Amino acid sequence: MKLDQASIAALAEHLDGAELSVKDVPKITDQYPDLDWGDAYAIQDGIRKLKQARGQNVVGYKAGLTSRAKMEQMGVTTPVFGLLFDYMKVPEGSDVDTRGLIHPKVEAELAFVLKRPLRGPGCNIGNVLAATDFVVPAVEVIDSRYQNFRFDLQSVIADNTSASRYIAGGRRISELSGLDLRTLGIVLEKNGEIVALAAGAAVLGHPAAAVAMLANHLGRYGQELPAGSFIMTGGITEAIPVAAGDTINVRFQDLGNLSIRFI
Ligand code: OOG
Ligand code: MG
Protein backbone atom coordinates (compact mmCIF):
# COMPACT_ATOMS: atom_id res chain seq x y z
CA MET A 1 0.00 0.00 0.00
CA LYS A 2 1.35 3.39 -0.99
CA LEU A 3 -1.52 5.73 0.00
CA ASP A 4 -2.70 6.75 3.47
CA GLN A 5 -6.25 6.11 4.70
CA ALA A 6 -7.34 9.71 4.11
CA SER A 7 -6.30 9.61 0.42
CA ILE A 8 -8.03 6.25 -0.05
CA ALA A 9 -11.26 7.58 1.45
CA ALA A 10 -11.04 10.77 -0.65
CA LEU A 11 -10.52 8.79 -3.88
CA ALA A 12 -13.48 6.51 -3.04
CA GLU A 13 -15.68 9.61 -2.64
CA HIS A 14 -14.26 11.10 -5.83
CA LEU A 15 -15.12 8.03 -7.96
CA ASP A 16 -18.47 7.33 -6.29
CA GLY A 17 -19.27 11.02 -6.83
CA ALA A 18 -18.39 10.75 -10.54
CA GLU A 19 -20.91 7.90 -10.85
CA LEU A 20 -23.61 9.78 -8.94
CA SER A 21 -23.16 12.99 -10.91
CA VAL A 22 -22.76 11.13 -14.25
CA LYS A 23 -19.56 13.02 -14.98
CA ASP A 24 -16.30 11.47 -16.13
CA VAL A 25 -12.96 12.23 -14.50
CA PRO A 26 -9.28 11.68 -15.43
CA LYS A 27 -7.86 8.32 -14.37
CA ILE A 28 -6.65 8.57 -10.79
CA THR A 29 -3.12 7.32 -11.50
CA ASP A 30 -2.49 10.62 -13.33
CA GLN A 31 -2.47 12.24 -9.89
CA TYR A 32 -1.26 9.22 -7.89
CA PRO A 33 1.20 7.36 -10.15
CA ASP A 34 2.45 5.16 -7.26
CA LEU A 35 -1.01 3.85 -6.38
CA ASP A 36 -0.67 0.05 -6.16
CA TRP A 37 -3.09 -2.90 -6.35
CA GLY A 38 -3.63 -2.90 -2.60
CA ASP A 39 -4.58 0.78 -2.72
CA ALA A 40 -6.86 0.15 -5.69
CA TYR A 41 -8.84 -2.61 -3.96
CA ALA A 42 -8.94 -0.49 -0.79
CA ILE A 43 -10.53 2.38 -2.79
CA GLN A 44 -13.05 -0.08 -4.28
CA ASP A 45 -13.83 -1.21 -0.73
CA GLY A 46 -14.29 2.43 0.27
CA ILE A 47 -16.85 2.79 -2.53
CA ARG A 48 -18.63 -0.32 -1.17
CA LYS A 49 -18.89 1.33 2.24
CA LEU A 50 -20.27 4.57 0.76
CA LYS A 51 -22.91 2.70 -1.21
CA GLN A 52 -23.86 0.52 1.75
CA ALA A 53 -24.23 3.64 3.90
CA ARG A 54 -26.82 4.79 1.33
CA GLY A 55 -28.66 1.48 1.67
CA GLN A 56 -27.31 -0.10 -1.52
CA ASN A 57 -26.40 -3.75 -1.05
CA VAL A 58 -23.88 -6.08 -2.63
CA VAL A 59 -25.73 -8.75 -4.64
CA GLY A 60 -22.87 -10.34 -6.55
CA TYR A 61 -19.35 -10.31 -7.85
CA LYS A 62 -17.79 -9.72 -11.23
CA ALA A 63 -14.59 -10.70 -12.94
CA GLY A 64 -13.48 -8.44 -15.76
CA LEU A 65 -10.79 -8.36 -18.44
CA THR A 66 -10.85 -12.15 -18.53
CA SER A 67 -10.88 -12.58 -22.34
CA ARG A 68 -8.13 -11.69 -24.80
CA ALA A 69 -10.64 -9.58 -26.73
CA LYS A 70 -11.30 -7.43 -23.65
CA MET A 71 -7.64 -7.29 -22.61
CA GLU A 72 -6.59 -6.16 -26.08
CA GLN A 73 -9.42 -3.63 -26.28
CA MET A 74 -8.44 -2.04 -22.96
CA GLY A 75 -4.65 -2.54 -23.23
CA VAL A 76 -4.21 -4.62 -20.06
CA THR A 77 -3.14 -8.20 -19.37
CA THR A 78 -4.61 -9.21 -16.01
CA PRO A 79 -8.19 -9.93 -14.86
CA VAL A 80 -9.76 -7.67 -12.23
CA PHE A 81 -12.60 -8.16 -9.73
CA GLY A 82 -15.48 -5.95 -8.64
CA LEU A 83 -18.82 -5.89 -6.85
CA LEU A 84 -22.41 -5.83 -8.14
CA PHE A 85 -24.99 -3.82 -6.19
CA ASP A 86 -28.78 -4.19 -6.10
CA TYR A 87 -29.44 -0.93 -7.98
CA MET A 88 -27.37 -2.22 -10.93
CA LYS A 89 -29.75 -5.09 -11.68
CA VAL A 90 -32.06 -4.46 -14.62
CA PRO A 91 -35.05 -6.83 -14.79
CA GLU A 92 -35.32 -8.81 -18.02
CA GLY A 93 -37.58 -6.99 -20.45
CA SER A 94 -37.13 -3.50 -18.99
CA ASP A 95 -35.16 -0.67 -20.55
CA VAL A 96 -31.85 0.85 -19.51
CA ASP A 97 -32.05 4.60 -19.05
CA THR A 98 -28.86 6.09 -20.53
CA ARG A 99 -29.43 9.41 -18.77
CA GLY A 100 -27.87 7.94 -15.63
CA LEU A 101 -24.82 6.70 -17.54
CA ILE A 102 -21.70 8.40 -18.94
CA HIS A 103 -20.69 6.30 -21.97
CA PRO A 104 -22.14 2.79 -21.63
CA LYS A 105 -20.89 -0.35 -23.40
CA VAL A 106 -22.36 -3.85 -23.32
CA GLU A 107 -20.70 -7.21 -22.78
CA ALA A 108 -22.05 -10.75 -23.22
CA GLU A 109 -21.14 -12.89 -20.23
CA LEU A 110 -21.89 -16.16 -18.49
CA ALA A 111 -22.83 -15.94 -14.81
CA PHE A 112 -22.49 -18.65 -12.17
CA VAL A 113 -24.61 -19.18 -9.07
CA LEU A 114 -23.03 -21.29 -6.33
CA LYS A 115 -24.74 -23.90 -4.18
CA ARG A 116 -21.68 -24.32 -1.96
CA PRO A 117 -19.09 -21.81 -0.76
CA LEU A 118 -15.71 -21.54 -2.47
CA ARG A 119 -12.57 -20.49 -0.67
CA GLY A 120 -9.11 -19.94 -2.10
CA PRO A 121 -6.17 -20.38 -2.34
CA GLY A 122 -5.90 -23.41 -4.60
CA CYS A 123 -9.41 -23.19 -6.04
CA ASN A 124 -9.61 -24.66 -9.58
CA ILE A 125 -12.15 -25.22 -12.37
CA GLY A 126 -13.17 -28.62 -10.92
CA ASN A 127 -13.90 -27.09 -7.52
CA VAL A 128 -16.00 -24.39 -9.19
CA LEU A 129 -18.06 -26.83 -11.26
CA ALA A 130 -18.66 -29.02 -8.19
CA ALA A 131 -19.89 -25.96 -6.22
CA THR A 132 -22.05 -24.54 -9.04
CA ASP A 133 -25.83 -24.56 -8.71
CA PHE A 134 -26.50 -23.21 -12.21
CA VAL A 135 -25.12 -21.09 -15.04
CA VAL A 136 -27.21 -18.30 -16.53
CA PRO A 137 -26.66 -15.95 -19.48
CA ALA A 138 -25.97 -12.32 -18.61
CA VAL A 139 -25.29 -8.98 -20.23
CA GLU A 140 -23.22 -6.41 -18.39
CA VAL A 141 -23.48 -2.68 -19.06
CA ILE A 142 -20.11 -1.20 -18.11
CA ASP A 143 -19.64 2.55 -17.70
CA SER A 144 -16.12 3.61 -16.77
CA ARG A 145 -16.06 6.77 -14.71
CA TYR A 146 -12.85 7.69 -16.57
CA GLN A 147 -12.66 10.00 -19.55
CA ASN A 148 -12.72 8.11 -22.88
CA PHE A 149 -12.78 4.75 -21.03
CA ARG A 150 -8.99 5.18 -20.64
CA PHE A 151 -7.43 3.56 -17.59
CA ASP A 152 -4.74 1.27 -16.24
CA LEU A 153 -5.36 -1.71 -13.97
CA GLN A 154 -5.08 0.21 -10.70
CA SER A 155 -7.50 2.90 -11.90
CA VAL A 156 -10.12 0.44 -13.16
CA ILE A 157 -9.98 -1.68 -9.99
CA ALA A 158 -10.49 1.45 -7.87
CA ASP A 159 -13.49 2.35 -10.09
CA ASN A 160 -15.16 -0.97 -9.15
CA THR A 161 -14.18 -2.32 -12.58
CA SER A 162 -16.61 -0.02 -14.45
CA ALA A 163 -19.61 -1.89 -12.94
CA SER A 164 -22.85 -0.09 -13.80
CA ARG A 165 -25.85 -2.28 -14.80
CA TYR A 166 -26.46 -5.94 -15.57
CA ILE A 167 -29.22 -8.21 -16.71
CA ALA A 168 -29.38 -11.97 -16.21
CA GLY A 169 -31.97 -14.33 -17.58
CA GLY A 170 -32.71 -16.81 -20.31
CA ARG A 171 -32.33 -20.48 -19.47
CA ARG A 172 -30.66 -21.60 -16.25
CA ILE A 173 -28.61 -24.70 -16.75
CA SER A 174 -28.04 -26.69 -13.59
CA GLU A 175 -26.89 -29.95 -15.13
CA LEU A 176 -23.45 -28.81 -16.20
CA SER A 177 -22.27 -32.25 -17.28
CA GLY A 178 -24.34 -32.03 -20.45
CA LEU A 179 -23.00 -28.62 -21.40
CA ASP A 180 -19.50 -27.66 -22.52
CA LEU A 181 -19.10 -24.00 -21.61
CA ARG A 182 -15.90 -23.81 -23.69
CA THR A 183 -17.66 -24.42 -26.98
CA LEU A 184 -20.88 -22.59 -26.10
CA GLY A 185 -21.37 -20.00 -28.85
CA ILE A 186 -22.39 -16.39 -28.27
CA VAL A 187 -23.69 -13.98 -30.93
CA LEU A 188 -24.04 -10.31 -29.99
CA GLU A 189 -26.39 -8.23 -32.15
CA LYS A 190 -26.82 -4.46 -32.08
CA ASN A 191 -29.93 -3.11 -33.82
CA GLY A 192 -30.33 -6.44 -35.63
CA GLU A 193 -26.77 -6.66 -36.94
CA ILE A 194 -24.15 -9.09 -35.67
CA VAL A 195 -21.35 -7.02 -34.10
CA ALA A 196 -19.37 -9.67 -32.17
CA LEU A 197 -19.27 -13.42 -31.71
CA ALA A 198 -17.17 -15.92 -29.77
CA ALA A 199 -17.30 -19.07 -27.66
CA GLY A 200 -17.06 -19.52 -23.88
CA ALA A 201 -13.40 -20.62 -24.01
CA ALA A 202 -12.52 -17.00 -24.85
CA VAL A 203 -12.79 -16.43 -21.07
CA LEU A 204 -9.55 -17.83 -19.63
CA GLY A 205 -9.99 -21.14 -21.52
CA HIS A 206 -13.13 -21.88 -19.46
CA PRO A 207 -15.45 -19.34 -17.76
CA ALA A 208 -15.24 -21.33 -14.49
CA ALA A 209 -11.55 -20.34 -14.35
CA ALA A 210 -12.69 -16.74 -13.72
CA VAL A 211 -14.71 -17.91 -10.69
CA ALA A 212 -11.70 -19.87 -9.40
CA MET A 213 -9.47 -16.79 -9.81
CA LEU A 214 -12.03 -14.69 -7.93
CA ALA A 215 -12.15 -17.22 -5.07
CA ASN A 216 -8.33 -17.22 -4.92
CA HIS A 217 -8.29 -13.42 -4.99
CA LEU A 218 -10.78 -13.20 -2.09
CA GLY A 219 -8.81 -15.87 -0.23
CA ARG A 220 -5.90 -13.44 -0.03
CA TYR A 221 -8.19 -11.14 1.99
CA GLY A 222 -9.46 -14.00 4.17
CA GLN A 223 -12.86 -13.94 2.40
CA GLU A 224 -14.83 -16.66 0.62
CA LEU A 225 -17.57 -16.80 -2.00
CA PRO A 226 -20.63 -17.83 0.03
CA ALA A 227 -23.23 -20.35 -1.13
CA GLY A 228 -25.74 -18.55 -3.35
CA SER A 229 -23.16 -16.12 -4.77
CA PHE A 230 -23.93 -14.66 -8.21
CA ILE A 231 -20.74 -14.20 -10.24
CA MET A 232 -20.33 -12.67 -13.70
CA THR A 233 -17.26 -14.13 -15.41
CA GLY A 234 -16.34 -11.33 -17.83
CA GLY A 235 -17.04 -10.21 -21.37
CA ILE A 236 -16.57 -13.00 -23.91
CA THR A 237 -16.08 -10.55 -26.79
CA GLU A 238 -14.93 -6.93 -26.86
CA ALA A 239 -17.41 -4.45 -25.35
CA ILE A 240 -19.80 -2.64 -27.72
CA PRO A 241 -20.71 1.05 -27.21
CA VAL A 242 -24.43 1.80 -26.94
CA ALA A 243 -26.61 4.92 -26.83
CA ALA A 244 -30.28 5.80 -26.41
CA GLY A 245 -32.30 4.15 -29.19
CA ASP A 246 -30.09 1.05 -29.47
CA THR A 247 -31.31 -2.48 -28.92
CA ILE A 248 -28.92 -5.25 -27.97
CA ASN A 249 -29.77 -8.90 -28.39
CA VAL A 250 -27.41 -11.68 -27.34
CA ARG A 251 -27.97 -15.27 -28.47
CA PHE A 252 -26.44 -17.84 -26.14
CA GLN A 253 -26.21 -21.34 -27.60
CA ASP A 254 -28.47 -23.69 -25.55
CA LEU A 255 -29.24 -20.92 -23.02
CA GLY A 256 -31.60 -18.61 -24.91
CA ASN A 257 -31.57 -14.92 -25.75
CA LEU A 258 -31.22 -11.73 -23.73
CA SER A 259 -32.34 -8.37 -25.12
CA ILE A 260 -31.95 -4.87 -23.74
CA ARG A 261 -33.27 -1.61 -25.08
CA PHE A 262 -31.51 1.65 -24.25
CA ILE A 263 -33.66 4.74 -23.87
C1 OOG B 1 -13.41 -2.90 -17.16
C2 OOG B 1 -14.46 -3.93 -16.85
C3 OOG B 1 -14.34 -5.13 -17.75
C4 OOG B 1 -15.31 -7.34 -18.42
O1 OOG B 1 -16.29 -8.10 -18.43
O2 OOG B 1 -14.27 -7.59 -19.02
C5 OOG B 1 -15.44 -6.10 -17.63
C6 OOG B 1 -13.70 -2.17 -18.45
O3 OOG B 1 -13.41 -2.69 -19.52
O4 OOG B 1 -14.17 -1.02 -18.39
O5 OOG B 1 -16.44 -5.92 -16.98
MG1 MG C 1 -17.98 -7.34 -17.58
Image (cartoon, rainbow, N blue to C red):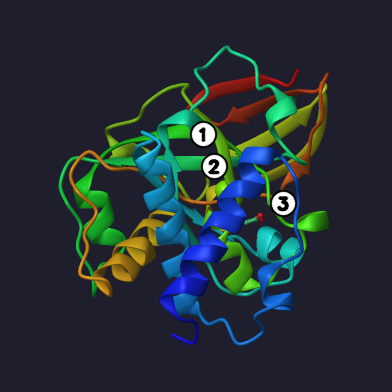
- Reading the image, the residue beneath label 3 is 238
Under mark 3, the amino acid is Glu
Q: Between residue 160 and residue 76, name the one nearer to us.
A: 160
Q: Position of residue 171 (x, y in %)?
A: 42, 22
Q: Position of residue 38 (x, y in %)?
A: 43, 78
Q: Is residue 2 above or below residue 198?
A: below
Q: Is residue 108 visible?
A: yes
Q: Is mark 1 within 8 Å of ligand 2?
A: no
Q: Is residue 223 above or below residue 111?
A: below
Whichever of labels 1 and 3 marks the residue nearer the N terminus, that label is 1
Q: Is mark 3 within 8 Å of ligand 1?
A: no
Residue placed at 20% from the left, 50% from the top?
Answer: 130
Q: Position of residue 58 (x, y in %)?
A: 35, 41
Under mark 2, the amino acid is Glu
Count neighbours of disc 3 (C-alpha within 10 A) and say few if under 14, some if 14 to 19, many if 20 or more. many
Q: Are marks 3 and 2 in contact (CB under 8 Å)?
A: no
View quadrant of ligand 1:
bottom right
User: Quadrant location of residue 57?
Assistant: top left
Q: Between residue 259 and residue 142, name the one nearer to us.
A: 142
> Hey, which residue is sitting farthest front in the picture?
6
Count neighbours of disc 2 (C-alpha within 10 A) and say few if under 14, some if 14 to 19, many if 20 or more. many
Task: State the separation of the CA atoms marked 1 and 3.
Answer: 15 Å
Tag of residue 138: 1
Q: Are marks 2 and 1 in contact (CB under 8 Å)?
A: yes
- Reading the image, the residue beneath label 2 is 109
Under mark 1, the amino acid is Ala
Q: Is mark 2 within 8 Å of ligand 2?
A: yes
Q: Between residue 158 and residue 210, name the one nearer to us.
A: 158
Find numbered disc 2 in the image and state the secondary structure of the residue it sits on.
Answer: strand
